[in-house]
Image (cartoon, rainbow, N blue to C red):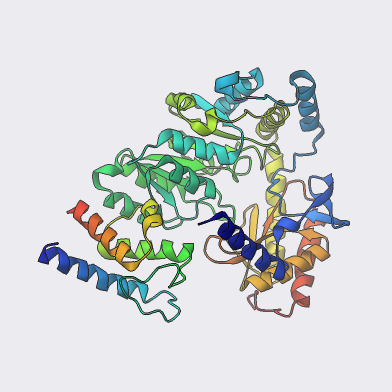
């Protein structure tokens, strides 16, 4: 395909989004007012689509930690850890992650996307086998592709289908890698990790779990869905991000295998990129400590989840899953989703508009991410805005049961 | 190609036609040279579903990475036959 054809193809996508008045890329937060509010198009808007699950981005402690790191360590690292050296703050954060998960090894990456890319390309070689949940994030698909391994999707959250696929791999199943997520970011459903682990162990394969959306949210200590499922010590690799509940930017992997550290010598997304800035590292480290010492944040989050979920359900909306910090409202068509999304913005509520191919099963979704930073009044406003949007839309009733 | 291999190929082709007929074909006549995306308009979600149905029907496992080299029904049939050969 020539570049001009590629431009034409992308222009087609942009025009289609513009015509439907549904281009999420046009949203600009002109001024941040707090972790849960910003000005968009001059309007004070409640943010319910930021993945800021614990609402830590404006906490005085996180800001002070970042400021101090800026003053003491400078604005950037200007290089990669392998080529230009690590800062003590990178090493200290890795140590904290290893302690938090009670494992011998932790590695940090410059983004969550790169964590998955770095682990998959570091672990896998051409001809290796990796079996991934069909709803996996793009970073997992891309990591598999870049590794050159043979990769096979299994039906979403279906341990029996995983078993079938591992069986078909024959002898190659032993030592293969199985990849799943904790909380799925679009529909807000969680993986049956105990069952998936049982199948993985039955075949002698390894299990990797991406807890990007579940760190700080699930489990007694906030270590994710694997902790909540009681299997934390049996998962081989856990990846995640700093850019959601930790309110910063970066990614990590922890492992019960000390050999994870060997990937520093063979993971290109780790080696050939600048390490995270001191301010990002300091913010993530402060947030990680805060997650460990403030379980009440999770209680606040789950109370907000219950309020939003029941409010939307009472209005008759069809929701993507059981209650979770991702509350996805299903609507019947792309046009209807765009119409409601614009109505919500006009009433000062920002959620995510998700349409195929970004949605996992062809659904059109209005995806809300709940934050511990939301007040009960803000949640009430979000629910009311949904109610008004649906009563004004020409498609009223098409999205709702009853 | 031996007669046996030719028969097996034809059998695979017929099986694929049956599976493909369940997808929105835009009234495209299914033949070996039918392009799965350009002619049939299959999107990435359709391709994933198709893969899973092929795997169940032939009891094989198809790496998603080989799909980027597959354009036509014939390409798909050849790939299925190759994977069946690996399994036997």
* Residue A159 visible within the image: no
Closest to the observer, B57 or B79: B79
Q: Residue at x 36, y 80 (%)?
A: B29
Please identify the quarter of the rendering in which residue A379 is found: bottom right
Q: Residue at x 62, y 57 (%)?
A: A323
Closest to the observer, A297 or A182: A182
Q: Residue at x 21, y 51 (%)?
A: B86
Closest to the observer, A155 or B2: B2
Left or right: where A390 falls relative to A361: right
Where residue A382 sits: x, y (%)?
A: 77, 61
Left or right: where A62 falls relative to A175: right
Where residue A135 sits: x, y (%)?
A: 50, 55
In the rendered image, the quadrant that contains the C terminus of chain A is bottom right
In the depicted structure, whether residue B24 falls above or below residue A155 = below
Q: Residue at x 70, y 52 (%)?
A: A370
Where residue A255 sits: x, y (%)?
A: 47, 31
Please identify the quarter of the rendering in which residue A76 is found: top right
In the depicted structure, whether residue A73 falls above or below residue A236 = above
Left or right: where A237 falls relative to A365: left
């Amino acid at each position: 395909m020539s570049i001009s054809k590629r431009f034409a193809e992308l222009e087609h996508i942009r025009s289609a989004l513009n015509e439907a008045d549904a281009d999420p890329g046009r949203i600009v937060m002109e001024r941040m007012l707090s972790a849960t509010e910003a000005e968009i198009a001059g309007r004070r808007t409640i943010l319910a689509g930021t993945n800021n699950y614990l609402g830590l981005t404006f906490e005085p402690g996180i800001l002070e930690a970042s400021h101090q790191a800026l003053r003491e360590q400078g604005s950037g690292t200007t290089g990669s850890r392998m080529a230009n050296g690590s800062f003590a703050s990178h090493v200290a954060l890795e140590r904290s992650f290893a302690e938090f998960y009670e494992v011998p090894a932790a590695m940090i990456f410059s983004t969550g996307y790169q964590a998955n890319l770095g682990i998959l390309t570091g672990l896998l070689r051409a001809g290796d086998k990796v079996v991934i949940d069909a709803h996996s994030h793009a970073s997992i698909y891309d990591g598999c592709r870049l590794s050159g391994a043979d990769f096979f999707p299994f039906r979403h959250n279906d341990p029996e289908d995983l078993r079938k696929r591992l069986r078909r791999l024959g002898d190659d199943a032993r030592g293969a890698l199985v990849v799943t997520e904790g909380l799925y970011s679009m529909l807000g459903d969680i993986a049956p990790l105990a069952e998936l682990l049982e199948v993985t162990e039955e075949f002698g394969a390894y299990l990797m779990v991406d807890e990007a959306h579940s760190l700080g949210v699930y489990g007694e200590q906030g270590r994710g869905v694997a902790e909540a499922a009681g299997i934390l010590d049996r998962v081989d690799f856990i990846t995640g991000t700093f850019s959601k509940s930790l309110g910063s930017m970066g990614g990590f992997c922890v492992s019960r295998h000390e050999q994870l550290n060997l990937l520093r010598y063979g993971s290109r997304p780790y080696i050939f990129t600048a390490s995270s800035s001191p301010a990002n590292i300091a913010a993530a480290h402060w947030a990680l400590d805060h997650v460990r010492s403030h379980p009440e944040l999770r209680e606040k989050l789950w109370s907000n989840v219950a309020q939003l979920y029941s409010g939307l359900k009472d209005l008759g909306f069809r929701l993507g899953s059981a209650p979770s910090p991702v509350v996805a409202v299903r609507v019947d068509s792309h046009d209807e989703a765009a119409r409601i999304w614009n109505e919500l913005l006009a009433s000062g509520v920002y959620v995510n508009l998700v349409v195929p191919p970004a949605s996992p099963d062809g659904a059109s979704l209005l995806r809300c991410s709940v934050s511990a930073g939301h007040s009960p009044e803000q949640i009430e406003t979000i629910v009311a805005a949904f109610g008004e949007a649906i009563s004004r839309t020409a498609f009223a009733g098409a999205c709702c049961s009853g | 190609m031996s007669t046996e291999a030719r028969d097996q190929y034809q059998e695979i082709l017929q099986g694929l036609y049956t599976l493909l007929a369940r997808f929105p074909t835009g009234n495209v006549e299914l033949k070996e040279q039918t392009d799965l995306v350009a002619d049939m308009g299959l999107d990435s979600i359709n391709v994933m579903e198709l893969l899973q149905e092929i795997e169940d029907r032939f009891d094989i496992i198809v790496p998603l990475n080989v799909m980027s080299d597959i354009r036509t029904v014939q390409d798909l049939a050849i790939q299925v036959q190759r994977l069946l050969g690996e399994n036997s």
